Image (cartoon, rainbow, N blue to C red):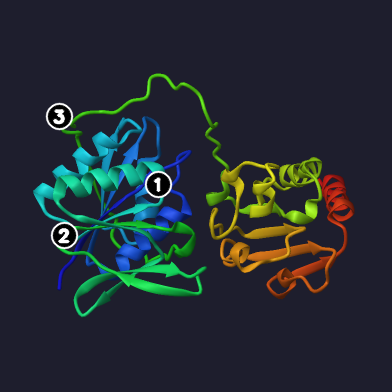
Amino acid sequence: MSRRALVVVEPRSGRVPAGQLGVLSAAARVCDAVEVLLPVADGDPVDELAGELARHGAGAVRVVTGLPATSAPRVAVVAALHAEEPYDLVAFENSSLSADVAGALAVRLGAGVCWDLSGLDDVDGELVGRRLALADSTSVDVGWVGGPAIAIFRTAALDAVQHPAGDAPRVVPVQVPAATGPEVRLDESPGGADVVRSGLDTADIVVAGGRGLGSQDNIALLEELASVLGGVVGVSMPVVDRGWYPYAHQVGQTGRTVRPRLYLACGISGAVQHRVGMSRSGTVIAINTDPQAPIFDLCDLGVVGDLTEVVPRITALLRERS
């Protein structure tokens, strides 16, 4: 059965993030023809981006220039492409913009949306999404009635798989339809909570702290080490509950799922609720005063010691070497 997919990506700083390439790889596993909608700005390296997308399964790249960072134009473009030749799957990374686009697109096309998918399979000729459940200890299958299947993926759960070099992808310019529908824009906010973008989702290095920090003042130790390493600070739920650090930096079942190359767990015991958010990290280093802490069952290197002594020493050594 022939199946067509459209994967919507959002380049950042002139490159496609690995998580979005993972979404593309997931679509390429179950679809015969995969296209990518690639919004670009003037000066973006289109040929380079298209080549990277092709290596991860894209057969055609639909390029749209100067697309505003709002949902309505994206919905209009995808709907217009779908009207030309229907897609069986429209896939997105998990982001607030993608959620807006996917929801509005589903209403417009009379389709269904499945959120937070960790995988996609073909079962007896039908698309079946996979979602992790019960603290990521098991998975459940979800499906769509009608089409196209609109899917939003948990990018930290996906692998970006490169394909053997083949033909260069077709690069097709796309115009934004003249009538994109009503636009919602926030001109003024009465105030409230600050929006914090942590960078955890795409960080290669995460320096995380837990209850063992002892006080909010010791967060500075993590920030200094993260700065030296070029990483991002993460925290466990107890740190957020105490008001020591913003929720946007929380790693775990009720926070972010991360997949860095290096994860330093400082003063984190390793409860299952935290582990589900970082268990796919490349190398895990744990620092804890309790030699029986569960985090030591997961880590690659463990240090039994007081983080307020160990972390500053690591930071100082790294500064000496740099």
> Identity of the amino acid at label 1?
Glu
Q: Earlier in the sequence, mark 1 or mark 2?
A: 1
Against 289, is 189 above or below? above
Work out whether mark 2 precedes mark 3 in sequence or the reverse, and give the earlier one.
Answer: 2
How far apart in space, not on screen, are marks 2 and 3 (Cα)? 24 Å
SS under mark 3 = loop
Q: Residue 82's x, y, as percent?
A: 15, 49
Quarter location, residue 120: bottom left
Residue that lies at the very extreme toward the left in this rendered image:
84
Q: Which residue lies at the image location 37% right of the left edge and 63% below the top edge?
A: 25
Give residue 147's mark. 2
**Which quadrant would the N terminus be assigned to in this image?**
bottom left
Cα gap from disc 1 to disc 2, whole angstroms: 32 Å
- The foreground one among 152 and 164 is 152
- Residue that numbered label 3 is attached to: 179
Q: Residue at x 77, y 58 (%)?
A: 267
Task: Say whether residue 119 is left or right of residue 62.
Answer: right
The amino acid type, in three-letter code, at marker 2 is Gly
Callout 3 amino acid = Ala
Relative placement, left or right, of 119 versus 293 is left
Pointer 1 residue: 48
Q: Observer-nearest residue: 40 or 120?
A: 120
| Quarter of the view holding residue 248 | top right
Q: Residues within 10 Å of mark 1 (few under 14, many from 20)?
A: few
- Contact between marks 1 and 3 (CB within 8 A): the answer is no
